[in-house]
Image (cartoon, rainbow, N blue to C red):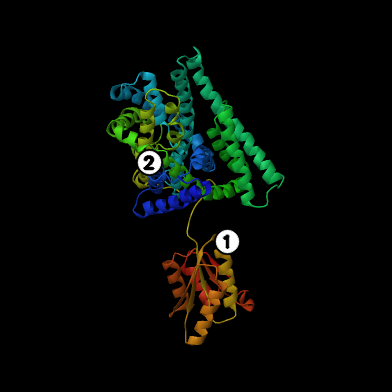
Amino acid sequence: MPNSLLLSMILILLLGFLGGQLASKVGAPSLLGMMIVGILLGSQVSNLISESALNLADDLRTMAVMVILMRAGLGLDREKLVRQGSVALRLGFLPAMTEAIAISFVSIWLFQFDFLTGLLLGCVVSAESPAVIVPGMLRLKSLGWGVSKGIADAILTGSALSDVLVLLVFSLVLNFLAQGSIASNALWLMPIQVITQIIFGVIIGYLTAKLIVFCVIKQHWCQNPVQETLITASLALLLVVLANQLPYFSGYLAVMAMGFFLIEFSPPLARRLRQEFNYLWIVAEILLFVLMGASIQLEVLGDVLFSGIILLVIGLIFGRTIGWYLSTLGSNWTWREKLFLLPGNSAKATVQAAIGAIPLSLGIPGGDIILAIAALSILITAPLGAWAIPTFAPKLLTQDAVDPTKTTVTFRTVILGAINTSSMAISVLTKVADLARRTNGKAMIIHVADNISESELQKLELLTNKLLLDIPHQFVTTTGLVSEEIVRLAQECQATEIVLGKSQNQLSQELLTTSVSQAVLQATKIPVIIV
């Protein structure tokens, strides 16, 4: 095992990225490739991750989860949540609890556990993974799948509430099994604890969002989005850390609430933060899943493989499915939308990686089996969920208009510029370059040749390459009617804007009567900019 923390981080980030890309190339979820890299780098195979890096694994996973939850909060839609509030609330309690209870009974048969040890295993397995669900739901929102009924918002909120309940029950049962005794009123206080953690989590998230808006917007402490992200991410991470030390509120829910209220208080700030946290997730995802793979114990996993698969299937069919049915009972969801909960709300990863090893570390009988089942649930459901969400959404959900104020809308920007040998070519190319830089797009430059010499054509191409040096671009020459060729190429390359040039003395009443400008404006719905 290398002693260098820096070398270990380089291996994790570089090989994790490559593993994710290779998995994507063959049609598998990228997280599966990252987890395989983690297994190969971990102590079970090559042992290339240093002890110091493994000691930081929990803290790095916490940072990754914070990024996930902020992205989830910044993507929530208040109107859709109000409309589907009861469904989201029921999704936060019923599926996880019905699955945990079903698993507890099945584990008595499969592993000869007592009921409480089985319930402990059920809590570990039934927790939903924000690491898989949040990116999947945000991608669906950006594409418009299920947006009109707020299906993704309900699933996002329900999974956050679900983890609050599961972690509380897990802590209660773990305390009893570790100490052999429990306060007589602990079970009666559990519902109060759940409600208290939810209420205080929302309140603290609200106050933190207010603080961020006051510092960033009103006091102008930040000069760029990077500084805004630094403050927001630090405060979000602080909430998660404080919640671990002071278990009176849910840190996970507080972070999601903070992102949600930032949309309400300052939509422009929320839009900038949404983009920056998307960039942070690129690194956080690699750390989360590579370290998750490195923590898997392969020999224990092999011992419980068959029985573990049986337990997961029964827990899903006879446990979680009942919870899904009760959660959507009386809602306006169609049977197809309800069926989407199977791929959309089943993935396990983050919580299992965080708590799966705790029973074993405390010497709880059966702790090794609990850890192995937790690892198995990650290996099976995380890649399956990451693949199934985008695969089944088009088959089971309707595609609706996307609200760009609530989610990041990704689209390809292509600027088409039409130039000739006049002095206006420089103005057109300068405008095209400006638009492409602002939108991180690419440019298509067209010149309709008409008795032009080879030297003049080369000058135009050299001028284009010079002014668009840092812009992905293509220079195209063609022949024919100028307006028709411009419109044809704009349609072929799916241009988002067309830029035409007009000399100063033509910018009066002639503007819309000149043949080329008029013909292009009448022949296309693509926005036309006349320089």
Circle 2 residues within 10 Å: few <14, some 14–19, many ≥20: some
State the residue lying farthest toward the top.
184
- Give the number of the disc on residue 17: none
Quadrant where the N terminus sits is: top left
Q: Residue at x 44, y 49 (%)?
A: 16
Please state which of residues 528 and 90 is positioned toward the viewer in this rendering: 90
- Give the number of the disc on residue 438: 1
Please state which of residues 50 and 400 is positioned toward the viewer in this rendering: 50
State the residue lying farthest toward the right.
219
- Give the number of the disc on residue 44: 2
Vertical order, 454 against 157 (above or below): below
What x and y, as percent, mark residue 366?
Answer: 37, 25
Q: Residue at x 57, y 73 (%)?
A: 467
Left or right: 482 as drawn, with respect to 366: right
Vertical order, 307 against 222 (above or below): above
Is there any visible trace of residue 305 in the rendered image? yes
Vertical order, 207 against 398 (above or below): above
Vertical order, 281 against 490 (above or below): above
Please state which of residues 118 and 508 is positioned toward the viewer in this rendering: 118
What x and y, as percent, mark residue 311?
Answer: 31, 29
What x and y, as percent, mark residue 186?
Answer: 50, 16
Whether residues under marks 2 and 1 lie with C-beta atoms below 8 angstroms apart, the answer is no
Separation of residues labelled 2 and 1 (CA atoms): 48 Å
The amino acid beneath tag 2 is Gln
The amino acid beneath tag 1 is Arg
Q: Earlier in the sequence, mark 2 or mark 1?
A: 2
Count the numbered circles shown: 2
